[in-house]
Image (cartoon, helix red, strand yellow):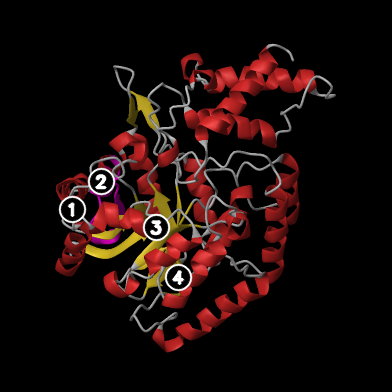
Amino acid sequence: MKKIDRREFLKRGGAAAAAVSGMGLLTSCNNNKGVAESDNGPKGEMTYRTNQGSGDKVSILGYGCMRWPMIKDENGKDIVDQEAVNRLVDYAIANGVNFFDSAPVYLQGQSEKATGIALSRYPRENYFISTKLSNHRGEYTKEEGIQMYRNSLKAFQTDYLDYYLLHSIKNLDVFNKRFKNNGLIDFLVEERKAGRIRNLGFSFHGSKEGFDELLALHETYHWDFVLIQLNYLDWNHAGSRNTNASYLQAELDKRGIPSLVMEPLLGGRLANVPDHIAERLKTRNPQGSIASWAFRFAGSQPGVLSVLSGMTYMEHLQDNIKTFSPLQSLTEDEFDFLEKTADLLSSYPTVPCNDCKYCMPCPYGLDIPAILLHYNKCVNEGMITSGKEDSNYAKARRAYLISYDRAVPDLRQADRCIGCRKCIKHCPQHINIPQEIHRISEYIENLRRNK
């Protein structure tokens, strides 16, 4: 897999910007026109990118609706806090955010409806809806897929969808099983022709070979956009789990296909970095947040239409709006700085969990993301010990066990895993979840036995 160094990165960005004058950038023989030059506007106003294929002027910051705030209902069930969602959407729209991305499976089926309620209070032409055909767990029938699509229209209280994705397609075999063999892709193409789907694409987690197979279908289906995982760690350090984002973005650029970005923070891991990495980032830019480095990196790609962020709290939304109002693209020196930062981060033994919760619910009640994220937090804070001989053993042991019991209820902890492996096939990061859970469970048991 070929690496793209910082000079090539900036060379592409400069060439793309120059190509905008008069004709839109990244044209191709497939009549894709890619993404037009940023419209930064005055200081303090949102940066926009224009989808040259549809003319959509899209905020570079997109709202990922996978992590809306939750509360308990009268029966103790987790439900979306609709009032909080409304407040977040109001603030986002007031500050220039106009792109909202959801899926039928987000928040155990609650995201689309909650997002639709919040957005429906505004004129339909004021925002873009992005959602997905998430037929991961059914029988892959055409009828099931069409019903899911129509349910999305109903949940969003609309008669058309701006950006519609085949959800989490990793190779041609998956595409054929879920969309081609049952005729679903033909139905969706017809819906696009009818205008009920304005842009049709797919989201991707997988190997280079799988990505190449799916892009080869561009001649047949004309992908209007693709959602990829892109951040400064995965740019050249995706490893065997996924494909380097540098490769994904370069292949889309060749074809003039706009990209949407997911996981710019890797589920928060690039906002909650080890202490010495945080100090490194803050020293370089004392005024900016740790997260702003990752968002600026993703937004600096000229072929990116919008960077999606799942903002649960108002302070996260406010900080991200500040970062993109307007976007200050990375300099060559800053890109080099983040490459070196990624080299440092890649050596840390964290579990690559992005807290997407696709592995949930666990049939045995485990809170899988909470277990993995708590472990990562302790790694970043230097609270993982290799044994009683460590000088900080007592402090690390106490810190881990106390915070673990607070973070993960007793009946949802790692020792309840029986290794059924049902979670593995749903993980977009391709984590061997039972293996990691058992490793963490053994570590915790040794701490409790004071070994």
Q: Quadrant of residue 402?
A: top right
The residue to which callout 4 is attached is 252
In this view, the mark in front (1 or 3): 3
Q: CA distance from mark 2 to mark 1?
A: 9 Å
Q: Quadrant of residue 106?
A: top left
* Element type where label 2 sits in the image: helix
| Residues under numbered marks 4 and 3 in contact, where contact means CB atoms less than 8 Å apart | no
Q: Amino acid at mark 3?
A: Asn
Which part of the image, by quadrant, shows the C terminus?
top right
Q: Is residue 178 above or below residue 66?
A: below
Look at 41% across and 21% down and name the residue there.
364
Q: CA distance from mark 4 to mark 1?
A: 30 Å
Q: Amino acid at mark 1?
A: Thr
Q: CA distance from mark 1 to mark 3?
A: 31 Å
The residue to which callout 1 is attached is 158
- 407 or 295: nearer the viewer: 407
User: Is any atom of residue 58 visible in this view?
Assistant: no
